[in-house]
Image: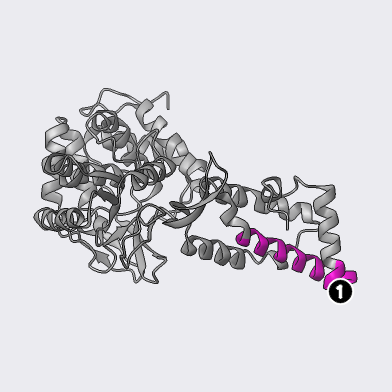
Amino acid sequence: MNLWNETKSIPISRTMVWEAYKKVRANKGSAGVESISMEQFDAKRSKHLYKLWNRMSSGSYFPPPVKEVEIPKKDGSIRKLGIPTISDRVGQMVVKMYIEPGLEKIFSSNSYGYRPHRNAHQALTSVRENCWKTDWVIDLDIKSFFDTIDHNKLMLAVEKHIPENWVKLYIVRWLVSPVLTKLGEIIKNKGKGTPQGGVISPLLANLFLHYGFDKWLEQTDTTVKFTRYADDVIVHCRSQKHAEHVLEAIRNRMTQIGLELHPKKTKIVYCKDYRRQQNYSVIKFDFLGYSFQPRTSKSKKTKGLFLGFDCAISISSKKRIADKLGELKVHRMTCKSIVGIAHRLNPIIRGWIRYYGKFRISMLHKVFKLLNNRLVRWARKRYKRYKTSIKRAYKWFNRVQEQFPNLFYHWQMGFIK
């Protein structure tokens, strides 16, 4: 790297490339169309980074096609991701890190997705508090958002805030990058969409929706509160009539900017609880893996129970965890002892609890009861003396929990039985 010459036409320094690489490496991720893994990239890191810096800093860098990867969605449909090569991810990160601080200054405080120092738990807290204050919710679902962002409209926003021509040059090149499908076809971009999976895509999507939705709604109706996490949006309204009026205005706005609300997934929801007893058919919505609905709650003052409107892990999220446990085949793991299983599973368990246990952690009980049962099944396959007696297997399991209560992360959090 010390041989790199920084006297280039575009002000991209070797330090910028190096810092971008470190972030990409920390994020991990799979190989793109070149099939070069992170390990292979690291083996010739200096060569790859020099080549990228040399081309980007001279304006001669053209991104390769993105690799199409299909991810099943919870509703049974398929989400298509576009995975760039590792070098291209580094290049995108260079530009992202350069423009993000300036764009952060203009973004709305109601936007939480893919932003520094902001996260899903903050978005959930915002929705939770707004549901207690406001009776009606619009649960918005933008149909195929990342695939339908209009390039011309997006570039108007880019032009407004980014004066550097070299930045705009590369943004346009990334927007028009072709896609290599699973069947080996190269599909050219037709002026719409930014690949889900690209490093710079979430930032560009936030910029598009800043003008397309956030700023527009804040100026259109000052009484409305909303929370947006990327393309997932919850809008809070005073009354059913108000919600219907706002939803119609949002539909028209989406049409203006070339987007469409999903007709089946977009809905108006009534936040029913002990105070709000109006009859309405829809009293539940999902947001970021949590379900918001009427739930029995305990009063902090009286210690008595009342019907509140609150969130907890959604049924679909529980199912995804159960499916993951099925994929892991815990009962068939070849570890010599249960300590080895704990070592393999604890990072995964910790992630589930830290995310889904933020609100109403007790709702994870059934999930971890399923895991505990899988551990008993593992013991019955592993040890001959437990194969014929499930009762003895559970006694063994209880002994292990008593002797090593901190062995599994969910045991530490109280999910014993």
Task: Report the front residue among 269 and 391.
Answer: 269
Q: Is residue 416 magenta?
A: no
Q: Position of residue 245 (x, y in %)?
A: 14, 56
Name the residue that disc number 1 marks: 389
Question: 48 left or right of 331?
Answer: left
Residue for point 30% across, 36% down? 96
Task: Report the front residue among 152 and 186.
Answer: 152
- What is the residue that sits farthest to the bottom in this orientation? 388
Colour pattern of the rendering: one colour
Region of the chain picked out in magenta, as a range = 366-392
| Main SS, magenta residues | helix
Question: 173 left or right of 274?
Answer: left
Question: Could you tell me the amino acid type at mark 1?
Answer: Ser
Instruction: Identify the element where label 1 is drawn.
Output: loop
Task: Report the front residue among 300 and 286.
Answer: 300
Position of the C terminus, as image quadrant, is: bottom right
**Is any part of residue 232 visible from this angle?**
no
Q: Badge 1: few (under 14), some or many (20 or more) residues near its Cα, within 10 Å? A: few
Question: 363 left or right of 269?
Answer: right
Residue for point 24% across, 58% down? 142
